[in-house]
Image (tube, grey):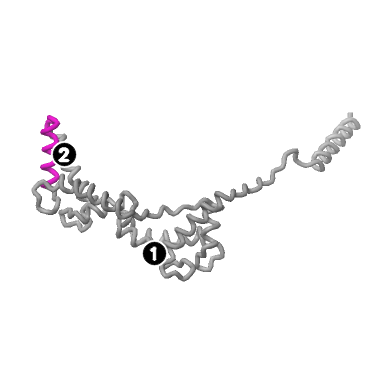
Amino acid sequence: MLRRDKDTEATSAEKMSAEQQEGPTECSCPPEPVKPTAEQAEQAKKEAQEAFDYFDLDKSGYIDATEVEKVLRKWVDQQFLRGITEEQIKENVVEFHKRLDANSDAKVTFDELYNAVLLKGEGFGLPRKLTPEEAEEGRKYAQQLFDSYDVDKSGHIDATDIDKMCRQWAEEEKVAITPEMEARLTEGTAEFLKFFDLSADGQVTFDELFKVFLGASHCEI
């Protein structure tokens, strides 16, 4: 009995040793990165150049924290970014360099940005520059929207204008103004002013409405 147990242990040890020498049957190495095609590389280069030129405000050949902060503040002013705090602006500046500044020298070069676009798929969501024709078409649309809300033709839209327009619509559509509807009208008026009244003076000018319209469309003139 005792001898047979030792033989069994010896046999098991031999098997384990053989398995260790053979190693795993499947390779656990990470897969080789897929090499971008020439078309993908060219597209990445185009996107990277557009983003680099946009952020490199002083045309120094690199992007620093000051330039990133200026761009973000411009986007806040143009309504591309809404409801962002001072702290969040600074956090985004840090994140920009953390993701793109490969050698951590506080300067993002074109090559660093290009590699981020090509190999990591980074995107920047830059506002699109409107052509003169598109800008004119957008202005016409914004003017139509403004005129429809400026019921008393005073040159601005206030809570009274919005309320009148909503009641006109309800009358035309034969919608009863119930207490619930009254509450929704009040809430809708407040939301309209919150969204478009950039100066928070209780009145929406055409310039304010057009500015928000461009920002919501992620475009600039």
Image position of 147 with respect to 62: above or below = above
| Residue plotted at (91% across, 32% down) | 3
Of the image marks 2 and 1, the number of the one nearer the N terminus:
1
Per the image, label 2 sits on a secondary structure element best described as helix
Q: Amino acid under label 1?
A: Glu
- Residue at 49% across / 57% down in the picture? 48
Quadrant in the rendering for residue 22: top right
Q: How many marks?
A: 2
* Local secondary structure at mark 1: helix
Foreground: 60 or 12?
A: 60
**Which mark is on residue 122?**
none
- Depth order, front residue of 31/56: 56
Query: In which quadrant is the C terminus drawn?
Result: bottom left
In the rendered image, which quarter is residue 202 located in?
A: bottom left
Q: Which residue is mark 1?
A: 69
Tag 2: residue type? Ala
Residue 165 in magenta?
A: yes
* Residue visible at 42% across and 70% down in the picture: 58
- Per the image, is 106 magenta? no
In the current view of this chain or complex, which residue is farthest to the front? Answer: 133
Q: Evaluate whether residue 95 shows in this view.
A: no
Q: Is residue 28 left or right of residue 160?
A: right
Distance between the alpha carbons at the discs numbered 2 and 1: 41 Å
Q: Disc 2 designates what residue?
A: 183
Residue 191 location (% of width, % of height): 22, 46
The location of residue 203, given as percent across then percent down, is: 15, 54
Q: Which span of residues is magenta-colored? A: 160-177
| Secondary structure, magenta segment, majority class | helix
The one nearer the camera, 158 or 109, is 109
Q: Residue at x 69, y 43 (%)?
A: 28
